[in-house]
Amino acid sequence: MDKNTQTANALVNGQVLKMTDIARLFLELIEKSEVGHITDSHQLIAHCRRVIQLGIEAKKKEEHTVSFLEAYEETLRLKSNRSKFTLRDIRYYIRKLMREIPELADKPIRMISINDCRMMLEKVFEALPQRKKARAILSGIFNVAKRRQWCDHNPISQIEIPVIIEQEIVPLNLQQAQRLIKTATYRRYRHCLAAVGLMLFAGIRPEELKRLNWSHIDLEEREISIPPTHSKTGGGRQIIIYEPLYHLLIKEVPKNLNTPICPKQWARLWSSLRRRAGFKKWQKDVLRHTFASFHVKTFKNLALLQVLMGHRDSRLLRTRYVNLKGISSRDAQQFWKILP
């Protein structure tokens, strides 16, 4: 006699469950599956078998999952070919989440709900830009888990992307740009001059600047190469070295071209330089915005500027970067003649 037959006999004989218990379970199964009025016994049994089968499949699916930590580690493995800066961001945000919410690491990823995700983001990341970044990173982890069938859907996709109201960034005027370059020539800040020039006259992002060394600058071709691994967007680009930047860089070239553009203690020196130049407040990326605005005013070539800035299209330039308020044609011409 096989095990199933033994179990069936035990049920019928009341050794495991009484007939009243079996009847209650049967009725509960029918009621909760919201079946209509069925009088035919064969149809009723077929319906119950179908519900039981679906329940078994759901239980198996529920058990086929991994912890959030394992899903995160698999995501890192799959993205191992991405830039070290991308991987650094993923590690930073997820480790912060698991540090603030210790139970998250061991929680089955299939059991993490939309409300869980919303709570995590709001609790751990108060600043909207960080919350937006964390949302994107979490979404990537859930997408990996979904492809591995460790969960059925991506709960992050149901959470609204934080709306960040960008403040207007006013570019430096001609006098401010001249003052900044002049301050960078002082003995204390001289090693910062090339870095300041690259942000002001080439529009290089501060984070990209930290990754560059002098080998990325070709003064003979008058070109700066931003490799894909050093770019914020993951795409490489070539930037023209305009006249003021050329004259600035030619005097600063070190013997060893593998020397980083940013000197040691760059963050402290750059902050001190700005204060010395008279800037009490400083908007992030203002030099990149200054470059874009003076470039458009002088050359009137949005397509070229888009390539130099590393943007996929010109929409961001038109809506965010280019601010010509207060920039005269005369000042724009003088901007490209600033010399240390």
Image (spheres, rainbow, N blue to C red):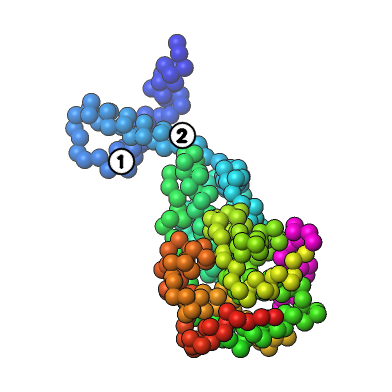
Q: Amino acid at mark 2?
A: Lys
Name the foreground residue: 291 vs 268.
291
Between 53 and 207, the one lying in front of the other is 207
Residue, x 60% and y 59% (percent of image)?
A: 226
Query: Does the image show residue 181?
Result: yes
Say which residue label 1 marks.
Answer: 33
Q: Is residue 93 above or below residue 10?
A: below
The residue sitting at 36% across, 34% down in the picture is 54
Q: Secondary structure at mark 2?
A: helix
Sooner in the amino-acid sequence: mark 1 or mark 2: 1
Q: Which residues are magenta?
A: 255-271
The stretch drawn in magenta includes residue 266:
yes
Report x, y in % for residue 330.
51, 88
Q: Residue at x 43, y 44 (%)?
A: 152
Q: What's the distance in space between the residues labelled 1 and 2, CA to CA?
A: 19 Å
Residue 266 is situated, as x and y percent measured from the top left of the image, at: 74, 70
Locate residue 176, reporting x and y percent. 62, 86
Q: Is residue 323 above or below residue 255?
A: below
Is residue 281 in view? no
Q: Tag 1: residue type?
A: Ser
Q: Position of residue 33 (x, y in %)?
A: 30, 41
Disc 2 residue crowd, few under 14, some 14–19, many 20+, Cα 10 Å: few
* Residue picked out by circle 2: 60
Which of the 4 quarters of the picture holds residue 185? bottom right
Residue 257 falls within the magenta-colored stretch: yes
Q: Secondary structure at mark 1?
A: loop
Q: Nearer the viewer, mark 1 or mark 2?
A: 2
* Figure quadrant of the N terminus: top left
Image quarter in which the C terminus is found: bottom right
Q: In this picture, is 326 found above or below 118?
A: below
